[in-house]
């Protein structure tokens, strides 16, 4: 590393490229959006305060706040997202920190292998419920989808008996719980409801029938290593705290995974980075750029 060009500047330049926020790199089509997601492995739909991760909005609109104006060119990302639902080109749901997240199909088995899902997606949820690890609302939603097939939000609330204002929060929370655990996902857009816009949901392993088979050979240690490799490939550098904040893993698991990647030569611990007072891990290649 050239001492005259500090690491903070190198990382900012690196992120300008990997986040596609440099004007020459910004994406301008749905196909380019898919390529962006595939290259990064997983990205947010919108920028999330306090989290450093590529997002589709900034890659299309530049590094600026989300526009309030509905006709802002950056909102083309909303159309891309809706058009991609159900096409099995990328995975989309509320995942990381309960925020709207895209995951490439290549990375999907690694995330799925970390979820509390087993071999029989039609019955294993009952064990989770009996152990107190699934709410009654989530169970009702899941069983409605099992029984009825894909349903839009309006029909799903009725089928799961979670209608009315009092149940709105329970329903929304349970949807998130199920999406975070890769049990369900939105697969289409419907014009139902007062807003003439809502998602249609399906059960993840029913919609992706080969996902469980693809995930079965992946153990948790390998999955975390692959996910962190992709994460650092996007952000260049991060602290323990940033990793924990995004993924929610136990501190000892994060430490073990970072140590493994450091021993493998992927990462190097760096203790003097201006924009973070905590020790950070940096992609080793950046220290030699």
Image (cartoon, rainbow, N blue to C red):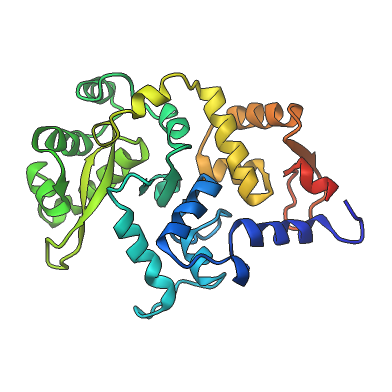
Which of 172/234 is in front?
Answer: 234
Q: x%, y% of residue 4?
A: 92, 61
Q: x%, y% of residue 263?
A: 75, 27
Which of 87/184 is in front?
Answer: 87
Q: Indicate whether 142 appears above or below 1.
A: above
Q: x%, y% of residue 58?
A: 52, 65
Q: Going by the picture, which residue comes out furthest to the right?
A: 3
Q: Residue at x 41, y 61 (%)?
A: 30
Q: Residue at x 55, y 71 (%)?
A: 62
Q: Which image quadrant is residue 122 in?
A: top left
Which of 214/138 is in front?
Answer: 214
Q: How many marks?
A: 0
Q: Indicate whether 154 appears above or below 283.
A: below
Q: x%, y% of residue 141?
A: 17, 39
Which of 166/207 is in front?
Answer: 207
Q: Would residue 176 appear left or right of 229 to someone viewing this image?
A: left
Q: Residue at x 9, y 50 (%)?
A: 155
Q: Would residue 164 appear left or right of 85 to someone viewing this image?
A: left
Q: Residue at x 64, y 44 (%)?
A: 232
């Amino acid at each position: 590393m050239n001492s005259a060009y500090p690491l903070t500047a190198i990382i900012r330049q690196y992120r300008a490229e990997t986040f596609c926020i440099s004007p020459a790199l910004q994406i301008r089509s749905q196909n380019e959006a898919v390529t962006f997601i595939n290259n990064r492995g997983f990205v947010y739909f919108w920028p999330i305060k306090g989290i450093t991760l590529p997002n589709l909005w900034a890659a299309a609109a530049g590094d600026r706040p989300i526009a309030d104006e509905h006709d802002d060119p950056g909102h083309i990302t909303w159309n891309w997202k809706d058009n991609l639902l159900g096409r099995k080109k990328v995975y989309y749901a509320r995942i990381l920190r309960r925020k709207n997240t895209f995951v490439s199909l290549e990375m999907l088995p690694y995330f799925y292998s970390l979820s509390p899902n087993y071999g029989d997606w039609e019955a294993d949820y009952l064990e989770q419920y009996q152990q107190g690890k699934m709410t009654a609302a989530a169970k009702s939603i899941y069983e409605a989808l099992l029984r009825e097939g894909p349903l839009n939000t309006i029909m799903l609330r009725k089928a799961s008996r979670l209608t009315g204002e009092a149940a709105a929060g329970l329903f929304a929370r349970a949807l998130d719980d199920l999406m975070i655990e890769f049990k369900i996902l939105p697969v289409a857009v419907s014009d139902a409801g007062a807003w003439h816009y809502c998602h249609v949901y399906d059960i993840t392993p029913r919609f992706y029938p080969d996902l469980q088979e693809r995930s079965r050979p992946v153990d948790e240690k390998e999955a975390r290593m692959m996910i962190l490799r992709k994460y650092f490939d996007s952000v260049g550098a991060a602290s323990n705290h940033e990793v924990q904040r995004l993924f929610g893993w136990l501190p000892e698991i994060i430490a073990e995974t970072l140590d493994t990647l450091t021993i493998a030569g992927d990462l190097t611990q760096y203790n003097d980075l201006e924009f973070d007072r905590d020790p950070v891990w940096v992609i080793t290649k950046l220290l030699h750029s």
